[in-house]
């Protein structure tokens, strides 16, 4: 048997089984139902990292706005400090002066070595000239390293995105003067999750791994309670919820969440046993005298094993036998005639 045909056969068997269950008399029993607590959760970015300026200066370029998508390492701004160019010019002038002194010192050293060979000068004098050459070379090397530092500082004027994600905030504008460490943009990345603030009286009922319901666009979705934080602030417990496909278009967006906080006993009847007349709800009750319609007050609807079950607030007791709506209506009409 092919896979599609096998799945169709299994589905048909399940539908027939559910239909036969609803077509038979149903004995009312108390069953545990989950108590759901509705709270609001806010969409949060998993990583919320600021892109900061590493040098002070003027913001000459700003290539991102709030809501833009960026990649890790992407250039988002550029800061220029004019003093760095002046420092490089000063270092270059000092290096030229030392280079001239070094050339003169090397000539003196060469002359001194020639004189030493002819016995005209002393070894001490030549060593002093050689030391002077080494000192000038060291000073030039120090200036080169200093120039590299200033050049690196100038390169650090480029502000890069710390992570891939969406730009959440840009608190500066082009032309602003920034100090080192100031925030240029805040980038949210690493995906999103829901953060909840639950009243502390429900804290003991929350466990990591619990399934929760999320209402979005009129449809219910399922998520998982990933973490419950131990710190209670302002009478509320903070918890995180993981959900696949959560959009990051609006970080901070509020969404309605239903959390399982307790269980209670309730009397449930299949939804197909309810009969509505003149705005009142009835069920067909099987009694020793026959079938009688009894008025009930229905409550919430719970889906149990794929079957919609209506909670009966009042009107029935455990052990009562109710009939499908069609059979109860027919029996009541025959009795009325």
Image (cartoon, rainbow, N blue to C red):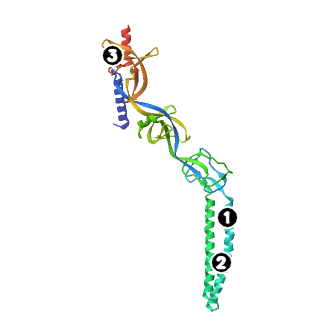
In front of the other: 133 or 125:
125
Task: Using the image, determine if residue 226 lies above or below residue 178.
Answer: above
Q: Nearer the N terminus, badge 1 or badge 2? A: 1
Q: Which residue is mark 2?
A: 102
The C terminus, quarter of image:
top left
Q: Secondary structure at mark 2?
A: helix
Query: Where residue 80 appears, x then y in whole percent?
Result: 66, 57
In the rendered image, residue 312, in percent from the top left (x then y), is placed at 40, 22
Is residue 185 shown above or below 207? below
The residue that disc 3 covers is 286
| Sooner in the amino-acid sequence: mark 3 or mark 1 | 1
Using the rendered image of the protein, determine whether residue 24 is visible from the camera's viewpoint. no
Q: Of the residues tagged 3 and 1, which is closer to the observer?
A: 1
- Residue at x 64% of width, y 81% of height: 106
**How many numbered marks appear?**
3
On screen, residue 15 versus residue 142, left or right, reads: left
Q: Residue at the top extreme? A: 337
Q: Residue 62 at x, y = what percent?
A: 64, 50
Circle on res. 139: none
In the picture provided, is 58 more to the left or to the right than 165? right
The answer to whether 119 is drawn above or below residue 106 in the figure is below
The spot of residue 21 in percent (x, y) is 34, 24
Estimate the spatial distance between the alpha carbons at disc 3 and disc 2, rounded to whole Å: 116 Å
Give the distance between the C-alpha atoms of the residues marked 3 and 1, in whole angstroms.
99 Å
Of badges 3 and 2, the one in the foreground is 2
Q: Nearer the viewer, residue 83 or 107?
A: 83
Instruction: Read off the residue under disc 1.
Output: 87
Foreground: 13 or 156? 156
Question: As drawn, is 233 to the left or to the right of 291?
Answer: right
Looking at the image, is mark 3 or mark 2 earlier in the sequence? Answer: 2
- Find numbered disc 1 in the image and state the secondary structure of the residue it sits on: helix
């Amino acid at each position: 048997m092919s896979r599609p045909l096998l799945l169709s056969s299994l589905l048909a068997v399940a539908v027939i089984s559910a239909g036969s269950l609803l077509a038979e008399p149903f004995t009312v029993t108390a069953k545990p139902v989950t108590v759901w607590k509705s709270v609001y959760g806010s969409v949060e970015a998993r990583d919320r990292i600021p892109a900061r300026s590493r040098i002070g200066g003027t913001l000459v370029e700003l290539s991102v706005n709030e809501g833009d998508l960026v990649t890790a390492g992407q250039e988002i701004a550029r800061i220029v400090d004019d003093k760095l160019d002046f420092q490089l010019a000063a270092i270059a002038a000092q290096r030229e002066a030392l280079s001239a002194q070094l050339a003169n010192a090397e000539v003196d050293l060469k002359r001194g070595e020639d004189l030493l060979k002819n016995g005209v000068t002393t070894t001490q004098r030549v060593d002093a000239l050689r030391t002077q050459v080494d000192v000038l070379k060291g000073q030039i090397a120090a200036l080169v390293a200093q120039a590299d530092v200033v050049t690196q500082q100038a390169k650090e004027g480029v502000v890069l995105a710390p992570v891939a994600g969406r730009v959440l905030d840009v608190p500066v504008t082009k032309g602003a003067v920034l100090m080192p460490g100031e925030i240029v943009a805040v980038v949210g990345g690493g995906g999103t999750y829901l953060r909840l603030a639950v009243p502390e009286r429900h804290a003991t009922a929350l466990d990591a791994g619990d399934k929760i319901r999320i209402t979005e666009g009129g449809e219910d979705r399922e998520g998982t309670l990933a973490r419950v934080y131990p710190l209670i602030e302002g009478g509320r417990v903070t918890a995180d919820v993981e959900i696949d496909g959560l959009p990051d278009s609006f970080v901070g967006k509020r969404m309605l969440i239903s959390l399982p906080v307790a269980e209670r006993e309730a009397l449930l009847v299949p939804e197909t046993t309810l009969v509505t007349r003149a705005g009142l709800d009835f069920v067909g009750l099987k009694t020793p005298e026959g079938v009688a319609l009894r008025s009930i007050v229905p409550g919430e609807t719970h889906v149990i094993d794929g079957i919609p079950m209506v909670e009966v607030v009042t009107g029935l007791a455990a052990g009562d036998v109710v009939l499908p709506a069609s059979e109860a209506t027919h029996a009541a009409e025959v009795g009325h005639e």
